[in-house]
Image (tube, coloured by chain):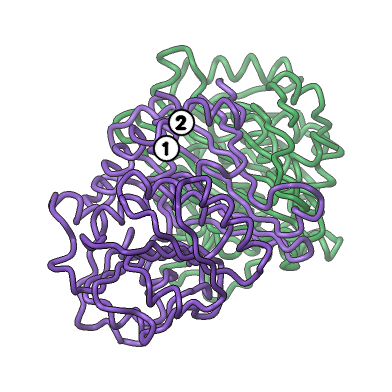
Chain colours: A green, B purple
Amino acid sequence: MIILSKQQILDKFDADAITLLLKDGFIAFSQKQVQMPPVQHLLFEQANGDCCIKSGYLQGDKLFVVKVSSGFYHNPAQGLASNQGVMMAFSAQTGEPQALLLDEGWLTALRTALAGRIAAELCAPRNIRAIGIVGTGMQARLHLMYLKSVISCRQLWVWGRSETALEEYRQYAQAEGFDVNTTQNAAELARHCQLIVTTTPSREAILHAVDIQPGTHITAVGADGAGKHELAPDLVAKADKILVDSWEQCTEFGEISQAFQRGMLAHYSLTEIGVALAQNGPFRNNDQQITLADLTGLGIQDVQIVKGILE
Amino acid sequence: MIILSKQQILDKFDADAITLLLKDGFIAFSQKQVQMPPVQHLLFEQANGDCCIKSGYLQGDKLFVVKVSSGFYHNPAQGLASNQGVMMAFSAQTGEPQALLLDEGWLTALRTALAGRIAAELCAPRNIRAIGIVGTGMQARLHLMYLKSVISCRQLWVWGRSETALEEYRQYAQAEGFDVNTTQNAAELARHCQLIVTTTPSREAILHAVDIQPGTHITAVGADGAGKHELAPDLVAKADKILVDSWEQCTEFGEISQAFQRGMLAHYSLTEIGVALAQNGPFRNNDQQITLADLTGLGIQDVQIVKGILE
């Protein structure tokens, strides 16, 4: 069995090759070629931690993947990363363990950011005067890093709750080549930005319908479990077109779930990323539409990124 | 992170210490102190394989456990064991991976056999003229090995479909100190035996109501998924008392599930092992009752056996 450390994994990481694998994975998922059992959740209240276990198998593959990923939010106070985790690959011919990837949660972060880039390619309007990033953490950084290769705009607004975190993010984004404006007022960010990525684990809405201009695309990646959301249901219902990674997951616990469950999206046909990719054209019909992409994270993304590292 | 090979795991295996941990685990499970998300299943039809992923956490523990175990039934033709798998332990304080146990399915086999011994301690009648083992595989051997320490009887009947397998089992059981009778007629076995363990992955009933004498206990461990069963529903309904490892699992897919779902057990109160253990007395009321124990396997058993190996 191969055991790879985080550094060995990052050395083998090729964003463009893995993006192609992720696209194939989304398409296969929407075509029902993927086994992806319901996610297992464990809660550790005394340590402010949670863990989710995902597994997946793409029909015909030589391997299947099991991922254990957790967030323990007291860790930073001890000098440890909040996100921890491993991915494992097993032979789909014999069941034997083949590889253990001690990625410390990085592969989850990377495949999420690359899915955001895929959503931006499908949905972004042609004219972007500024990019808006909601949040200042790891996802806020990785999304910006990968958007650079598909969006030419270098004007940036970033929203956060802490002045210190905003200043740190400013330095990061300037080093990436952006002109940076920081704000603690999300509506101000929305007034200036045509491509917005929301990356926080918020449990209350940060953006509302009144904040959003026509011709905006929003990618929301924070809602990966019941109760989390960053966009008000009235904003979700205002979108002209909605892209989801999984119809089932997004309507159950994604960013759009509250609006869906209240019957506010009855007139929509939600489109899965895999369906949009198979159609091979732009998702938005014109530059005035408001589009929304809801990314909850799929086991097939873990399968594909592990294949990308091992192959 | 500690990595243990199968041999290192077997060297650390202490059956009696782990039996005590398993008893504590069953009790904690029945007292709702265990997080045990629904099992994930994957199927590999082209390789005649399947995989199940179990996880568990006993409230207050320092670690939680994830198990990946699979059966690939073409493996023996390639000189590989059918059962493959790993168990992993993670810190419940930080989420960090702590140990990888490359047990190749052994810990699952061992904790199942030890659960069978616990069921025998709770349910066996006082007078056993012969033990009956249905099946000739790994579980059939491990159950016999561990029954020896709680049952003094050394008369054995074993049922199997293949003469060769029966002969191999005879040699195994003789070396363990038993007087062995082999048969391909399960009713003949049942006529002679007061403690029967059924260990096959059969999908059709091997024993029926007419086969069983008063004063018999049967432990059934083969049914761990939908469609598998070894006992006819009329035999299940004939039992005076029924012990289950998990009310939920056993009624959904255990040995008793068919009888339960047909309404044939309406007059029963099924008793969980954890409840029976907490009552700290014998499960059967007299030596004439027919008792049945249905063991589907619980994630908490994996948690406890990993603790037993690591502590």
Check if mark 2 and mark 1 are on a common chain.
yes
Q: How dense is the environment of label 2, judged by Cα within 10 Å: few (below 14), some, or many (20 and up)? A: some
Q: Residue A97's spot in the image, x, y percent?
A: 69, 40
Q: Which numbered circle lies on residue B13?
A: 2
The N terminus of chain A appears in which quarter of the rendering?
A: top right
Q: Which residue in the structure is indicated by mark 1?
A: B305
Question: What secondary structure is found at the residue carrying circle 1?
Answer: helix
Residue at image x 28%, y 82%? B238
A294 sits left or right of A21 in the view: left
Residue A250: name its quadrant: bottom right
Percent across and percent down for residue A238 are 54, 62
* Disc marking residue A195: none
Measure the alpha-carbon separation of dots 2 and 1: 9 Å
Badge 2 amino acid: Phe
Q: Classify residue B191 by image quadrant.
A: bottom left
Tell me which numbered mark, 2 or 1, is placed earlier along the sequence.
2
* Of labels 2 and 1, the one closer to you: 2
B311 in relation to B75, above or below: above
Residue at the outermost front position: B179
Q: Residue at x 45, y 80 (%)?
A: B187
Helix, strand or loop for disc 2:
loop
**From the viewer's perspective, is residue A84 above or below residue B28?**
above
* Residue B217 sits above or below residue A187 on the image: below
Quadrant of the rendering where the C terminus of chain A is positioned: top right
Residue B249 in sight in this render: no
Does residue B128 appear in the picture of this structure?
yes
Between A237 and B46, the residue placed more toward the observer is B46
Q: Nearer the viewer, residue A60 or B105?
A: B105
Q: Residue at x 78, y 53 (%)?
A: A93
Q: Classify residue A276 by image quadrant.
A: bottom right
Q: Residue at x 30, y 56 (%)?
A: B120
